Amino acid sequence: MASTGTPAPTAPTPTSTGRSRGTGTRTSRAASASASGSTRPRRRAPRRAAATALLLALAAVTTAGPATAATADAGRAPAGPVGVWQLDGYGTVLRVESGRLQEFQLTGISCLPGGTALRVPGGGPFRYATEDGEVLTVRPGSVHVDGSVGDRATRRLAALPGPCRDAPVPGPAADPVTTFDVFWQTFAENYPFFAAKGVDWNAVRERQRPRVHAGTTEDELFAVFREMLAPLHDAHVRLFGGDRFFGEGRPGTAVPTLELETRVKAYIQDVDLGGRAPQEFAQGRVSYADLPDGRGYLRLSGFGGYTESGDFASESAELDRILESVFTAERTARLRGLVIDLRINGGGSDELGLRLAARLTDRPYFAYAKRVRNDPADATRFTRPQPLYVQPARGPRYTGPIAVLTGGSTVSAGETFTQALMERPGRTVRIGQPTQGVFSDVLGRTLPNGWRLGLPNEQFLTRTGKTFDGPGIPVDVTTPVFTREEFDARRDSAFTAALRRLPRT
């Protein structure tokens, strides 16, 4: 990664370096509770199916107190990235030691210790893993999170900022007013979409802060926060408060759930595939079937959750194995058209989406550019866009016509993959309904009272600088997608429209 029907996922400890991508990890971006029922973040992962699309960003890590001071000798420049680094955007400072990384989460009024990560044995210099298996590579001037596309720029600091040196460990004794102020400030400094959503965040504070005082109960405080967040209708915004959960998607859409995924999978097999079971991979999250007349059908319910361990190395290896099995030399030579079904896709790793796109082209092309809000006082200021490209994979590739099926339950990494096909060489048509409209990795935060928060702070841009945050990626051909009327009539209009637009033998 959303009470768009999604049950509250288990909350990972947020870390700003990762993504809850979607209902997977968008790691990343992600992540939300995934369609498979997984709560592992991936864009994120909460950047991670991250929950679907409603989960917390990629890094489920243990919460810990501050680490010991950096080990560089006084007066001598530290080796490599050992030292203190501030990320460009993300409201984050990292203290990097040879064996341990400690995150600090900054706003203009607070500094709280975030997650920790430990050096990966034998993983090369300055690769760190969280307890949940997410891996960060730290270099002078940048941080990379496995599974999240692009790098995060950093600049060296001489020391931790003053407020971080004695940063309090979050806990339930925190004053409700302080928690409110940090909550509001976190969104004010990082959220890029207030204007697009028609929300005056300053007016929200003026209206809601008088309701909070030293005697405010947890239930009352959660109700206030819920009321503040609901108008955003953002599936990458989520709040975990004890056993309470809040998350909502775009009105009129449903965030993927295990129940919806189970129903749709059986329906497609019965109605679209004539009762024939497709070949399944990755714990049921990927399936493929050859269709009559030389077409193929590839369905993905997420870009993550493929393996039991859930770490990016095993997930990417599993996807590579799947793609080798699906895109064989014999099949790619005879395939006349391919349907890619993302209509129930909870998201996950954007990098995995690019790996699939690499099997669908014979020449490099622009996928999208990524940027992050980086001025706490100005929601229109961003880092320089970092362009990302699809590079052709080695081995057999399919370069013919493609029909991509999407809908409101296409979330996060499912959306960045869809965006990565928009400039694909060769004919690609989008059919169904617009996607959910959440692309960013999920920025994970811990509030002073220990509650956990996720919010987006990035944009994915087209070549012309357009974003699809909010309304989602539009389709070329509009059809119903898994409506009650479709189920009752036992029809799948999007699938039928795809076959009409693909050539046959």
Image: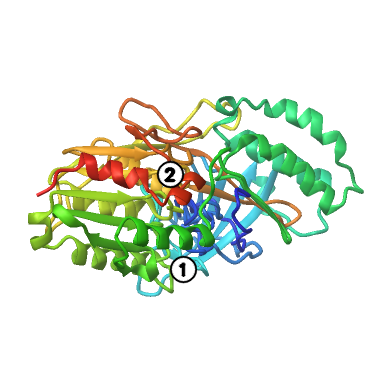
Asked if labels 1 and 2 touch by Cβ distance under 8 angstroms, the answer is no
Tell me which amino acid carries mark 2: Val
Q: Is residue 166 visible?
A: no
Mark 2 or mark 1: name the one nearer the start of the chain.
Answer: 1
Q: Secondary structure at mark 1?
A: loop
Q: Is residue 500 visible?
A: yes
**How busy is the neighbourhood of tag 2: few (under 14 within 10 Å), some, or many (20 plus)?**
many
Looking at the picture, tell me which residue is in the foreground, 211 or 405.
405
Name the residue carrying label 2: 481
Q: Residue furthest front?
A: 489
Residue sitting at 73 percent across and 60 percent down? 242
Q: Is residue 37 above or below residue 200?
A: below
**Left/right of residue 232 with respect to residue 209 in the rendered view:** left
**For discs 2 and 1, the disc positioned in front in the rendered view:** 2
**Left/right of residue 23 with respect to residue 476 in the rendered view:** right
Residue sitting at 74 percent across and 39 percent down? 227
Q: Position of residue 121 (x, y in %)?
A: 40, 74
Q: Position of residue 20 (x, y in %)?
A: 50, 53
Q: Position of residue 409 (x, y in %)?
A: 47, 47
Looking at the picture, tell me which residue is in the foreground, 477 or 462.
477
**How busy is the neighbourhood of tag 1: few (under 14 within 10 Å), some, or many (20 plus)?**
some
Q: Position of residue 156 (x, y in %)?
A: 47, 46
Q: Secondary structure at mark 2?
A: loop
Looking at the picture, tell me which residue is in the foreground, 178 or 84.
178
Mark pair 2, 1: CA separation? 36 Å
**Colour approach in the figure:** rainbow
Q: Which mark is residue 133?
A: 1
Looking at the picture, tell me which residue is in the foreground, 305 or 465.
305
Tell me which amino acid carries mark 1: Gly
Residue sitting at 21 percent across and 57 percent down? 291
